[in-house]
Amino acid sequence: MKTLITLTAAAAAVAGTQASAEFTLSDRYVDNDGDLIADIPTDESELIDPDTLIFAYTPVEDPAVYAEVWQGFLDHMSEVTGKEVQFFPVQSNAAQIEAMRAGRLHVAGFNTGSNPLAVACAGFRPFAMMAAEDGSFGYEMEIITYPGSGISEVEDLRGQTIAFTSETSNSGFKAPSAILMSEFDMVAGEDFEATFSGAHDSSILGVANQDYIAASIANSVKGRMLDREVVTEDQLEVVYQSQTFPTTGYGTVYNLTPELQESIREAFFSYDWEGTALAEEFGRNGEDQFIEISFQEDWAVIRQIDEANGVSYECN
């Protein structure tokens, strides 16, 4: 894990080509201070102060498992804010973004790749990230296969089918697409075929069970699955590992009252991780605190990868 994120070689290489993406917010939001996230409305009639806060964690693994992992933290948030807090299990990144855009989701952790889309289209205001005790954070994208697959290097993937997670995932689609194109001159539909598993754990299990010959995944998810013995080291081989990327970003929907947004921030940064289910689960990645982050700065590399891939931030 690293504290400083630099532009990936892949994104830098592709950035010189013509790309159609430019980060802009939906017309529903304003950004008068230029920090790239939606401003809190100044008209009180546009603000909401719900009795129950709905929280959702990015759908990378079994939602039922994470409902229990997050419960202690949600109890703490309830104490700090004076609100009931309910865990909302989401099955896809698109469903999570739509829930916040429709006003059904108030606090969330959006994965690395879907963060920009959540900010642009759902009024998401990220402010926190998990980190190690020394402030370091991040994970790497890996392309994995299984022993005996005949895949020993990236070039061996030509003519094969690679499993991705979803088009909004950084490590599950965006970063590997940019890297395969820029570093290896490999394009989906021409040099390899793409399939989508829907989630990192599904891709990892698919490779471990030899349903997929290769997959691009976040190694933080793989690490937790190895630690829980869902899969074993001898079922997987790493073909490629990227540089370090920022992890899940946590924040609120833009139109909660300023006071409520501030108390939610307080809940994140005052939470005592010691001895908690959250520490047990995410400590597998060396994470044991929330640190403050800047979408404008910390997600610059992800927006650059989006630009390299021609991602559109148009909101339906």
Image (cartoon, rainbow, N blue to C red):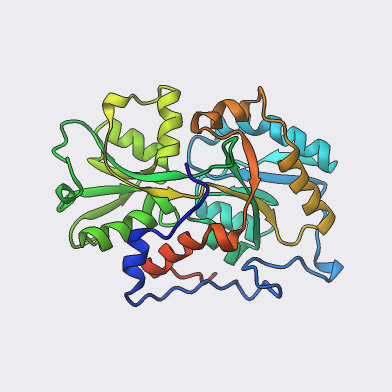
Along the line of sight, the residue nearer the viewer: 292 or 26:
292
Along the line of sight, the residue nearer the viewer: 296 or 92:
296
Asked where in the image residue 122 lies, by quadrant, the reply is bottom right
Asked where in the image residue 173 lies, by quadrant, the reply is bottom left
- Left or right of 56: which side holds 246? left
Q: Is residue 303 visible?
A: yes
- Left or right of 29: which side holds 84? right
- Left or right of 136: which side holds 292? right
Residue drawn at x 57%, y 25% as measured from the top left: 280
* Image: 24 above or below 301: below
Where is residue 264 shown, x and y percent of the image? 76, 47
Q: Is residue 104 visible?
A: no
Where is residue 263 shown, x and y percent of the image? 80, 47
Along the line of sight, the residue nearer the viewer: 156 or 104:
156
Q: Quadrant of the C terminus?
A: bottom right
Q: How many marks?
A: 0
* Image: 107 above or below 177: above
* Image: 111 above or below 257: above
- Left or right of 81: which side holds 128? left
Residue drawn at x 81%, y 52% as measured from the top left: 260
* Image: 41 above or below 112: below
Residue drawn at x 28%, y 40% as measured from the top left: 144
Where is residue 23 shown, x and y percent of the image? 52, 71
Residue drawn at x 46%, y 60% as measured from the top left: 301
Where is residue 106 shown, x and y percent of the image? 70, 52
Along the line of sight, the residue nearer the viewer: 198 or 181:
181
